[in-house]
Image (tube, rainbow, N blue to C red):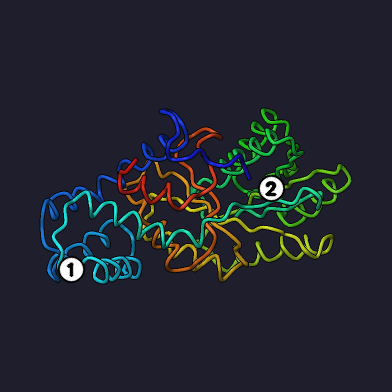
Amino acid sequence: MAPAAEPATAAPGGWFSRLKSGLARSTARLTEGVTTLFRKRRLDEAALEELEEMLITADLGVAASARIVEGFRRSRFGKEVTDEEVKAALAEEIAAILAPVAHEMEVDPRRAPHVVLVVGVNGTGKTTTIAKLGRIYRELGLTCGFVAGDTFRAAAVEQLQIWGERTGCQVHAPAKPGADAAGLAFDALRAAKEAGTQVLLVDTAGRLHNKAALMEELRKIIRVLKRQDETAPHSVLLVLDATTGQNALQQVKVFKEMVAVTGLAVTKLDGSAKGGVVVALAQEFGLPVHMVGVGETAQDLRPFTARDFARGLVGLD
């Protein structure tokens, strides 16, 4: 998707610094209790119970919190520990949960185009994520197109048109508000094939108040894409807003019912104290977490790396 994330030892202002800064509110929520609880204390059952409650409160979820505490019980039970030792061990346990899902979203430009269907609830940052990905792919030298498939939301269409002009990505927009999104996607894929476009990013609606209608719309888009390329869409990227916390888990369940989600993008971590939900998502679903966003610029959307995220979440360098 993008150049590899800079290592944890990156210079100030590098990716790890931005990630750590973006996770600051989540870190504070997670570690303030650790510091209070474990200044120097024996890791007994009472301490483990308090730690588990703390992790659940920090949005890591019940299953992941139980797994982490069980790891502490096996390796450190009965030992006297400090808060710094607990943070380091926490980072290790969290990284172990995240490592299996840390997979960059690979696009195959030889498909011409590699079709990425971008789904999610309105307001999660789908359109902005598409714009950022478009800039990243263009900087990598790939030709890229946008499909403004959220046809009822004029702001989303206009946003993609502006980003298309800025990045040199062709924008396939509806002729009028409320146009058929599937028909637009069909025409866009045909045009992209004719032009030899290497990546086609398809925006979609996300109005969950009428789940049945949204499900049918998404499935229709997929059906018409397959008429031209039976392997399309090649990626189905679900965009989640970190500020919604545990609500993100419900969104994954709903969209997995609708479409075959292939991976996740977690946005707005810089505005959230609920970054721990990424751990809950990894434990609950095991879906690849392709990328995380910690700011407004394209440089703030990067491939997800387990160790960096785990250490950033607990405030370690």
In the depicted structure, whether residue 27 falls above or below residue 236: above
Residue 49 is tagged as 1
What residue is rendered at 73% in x and 57% in y?
Answer: 182
Residue nearest the observer in this picture, 52 or 83 = 83
Give the image location of residue 281, x and y in percent. 44, 62
Give the image location of residue 37, x and y in percent. 13, 55
What residue is rendered at 85% in x and 49% in y?
Answer: 193
Label 1 vs label 2: CA separation?
46 Å
Q: Amino acid at mark 2?
A: Leu
Helix, strand or loop under label 2: strand
How packed mark 1 is, by other alpha carbons closer than 10 Å (few <14, some 14-19, many 20 or more), is: few
How packed mark 2 is, by other alpha carbons closer than 10 Å (few <14, some 14-19, many 20 or more), is: many
Please tell me how many numbered marks the rendered image carries. Answer: 2
**Figure quadrant of residue 57:** bottom left
Determine whether, in the image, residue 74 is placed left or right of residue 115: left
State the residue position of label 2: 201
Determine whether, in the image, residue 119 is placed left or right of residue 270: right
**Figure quadrant of residue 58:** bottom left
Helix, strand or loop under label 1: helix
Of circles 1 and 2, the one toward us is 1
